[in-house]
Image: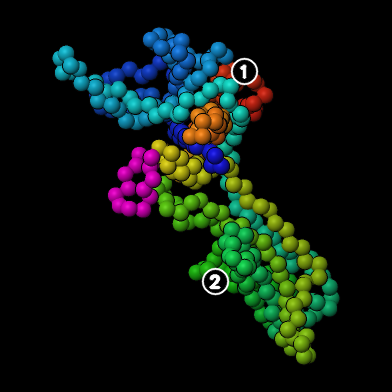
Amino acid sequence: MITYVNTVFVSNKEGAAVLTAMPAATTTNAVPANYGDFILMNCDESTKGDATKLYTVDATTNTFKIGMITKNNATIISKADGSVKYQPIVRWSNEIKAADIRDIRSSKYAADTEDVVTLDFSKVVDANTLALFAEGGKRIIVRLTFKDLPTRYRKWTESYEYVTEAGDDMVKIAAGIAKQINLQYKRARVTASAAAGVLTLTALPYDDDNVVDSYSWAGKVRFVADCYYTDPAAAAFASRNKYFLPGMIIEKTPGVWSTTSAKLVRDRESQGMGYDGIMNRTWWPIIKPDMETKLDGKYNGLTFQFENTYRAADDIFRKTKQNVEVYATDAAICNTIATTLKTIAADTDRATNDIAA
């Protein structure tokens, strides 16, 4: 299979634990105390009928699955006396064979940052260029090329123009361009500021996906910038020529987009629901489980891949690639699960370093 079959767990519980027994049923239909905890089930034949071994996994375990306690309960009615109890529901992964684990990866929470580009006009010190701009009437153009908006035949660009006035220096030009960019807010994808002749452009965060049940996948503004000028008063075709500013320094600091960013976690959780049968995303009503991701959550991640063997229709045994992804605000639970997986897989080289702060 080209696409990995995904099971995604999201836990917002601080102090989450890996349980060694199923949570007990209660007499009240309340959110379980173990909501957000994890549990591992030993699926080996030797554990059948032995409750003491069912939730114990170690280096001798061949087949297991991982689950997370949800906030919902199953109603259990006794045939004997009609009494009602509520059993916390566990959401399980597919069965995993220890020998088929291929990779274990962990990711620590990191705050997202946006792309920043600086254009240092103060480095333009050529006397002829400074005198030309001081005459006034020269067009200074800053062009932004956005890498996150691909089109079929070209890239999306936005250009901002400042026409110099008599006596302008580099400080005034940088400030003038910043003002032009900020005034055109309807098409703004960056914010601009200027200080001491340095123009700083900062990408704006996407704002069309600020809800958990978003129809838009997470995105990030990615852009580069260049700058040139023209002299409309020049003779003939020289008036149309584009000239770069000698000495100008343009630097970019790429934004950081963590793989455990809350919006990306939301997208992974939403996409993973398709493997649980949640296929309708357009026709009302959309019936699906509640999302666990919180957009203000600071998540750590653990992903492990495995390849379960199955017998295909052509009577050949094949492997299907699958993922289990765990995202938790508590880094310690990711480390605990990773340590357990390393023990089961009997291969300490398959896991990365701990991510606990």
Which residue corresponds to the image point at 49% horizontal and 42% vertical from the top-left?
Answer: 268
Instruction: Classify residue 305 by image quadrant.
Output: top right
What's the CA distance linking mark 1 and mark 2? Answer: 61 Å
User: Residue 43 in the image: x percent, y percent?
Assistant: 46, 18
Residue 286 in magenta?
yes
Q: Residue furthest bottom?
A: 236
Front position in the image: 215 or 143: 215
Front position in the image: 239 or 172: 239
Q: Which residue carries the number 2 mark?
A: 183
- Residue 243 in the figure: left or right of residue 38: right
Callout 1: SS? loop
Which residue corresponds to the image point at 33% horizontal and 25% vertical from the top-left?
Answer: 88
Q: Amino acid at mark 2?
A: Leu
Q: Which residues are magenta?
A: 277-291
User: Residue 301 in the image: x percent, y percent?
Assistant: 55, 34
Residue count near mark 2 (Cα–Cα under 10 Å), binned few <14, some 14–19, many ≥20: few
Q: Amino acid at mark 1?
A: Ala
Which residue corresponds to the image point at 66% horizontal and 52% vertical from the top-left?
Answer: 254
Nearest to N terminus: mark 1 or mark 2:
2
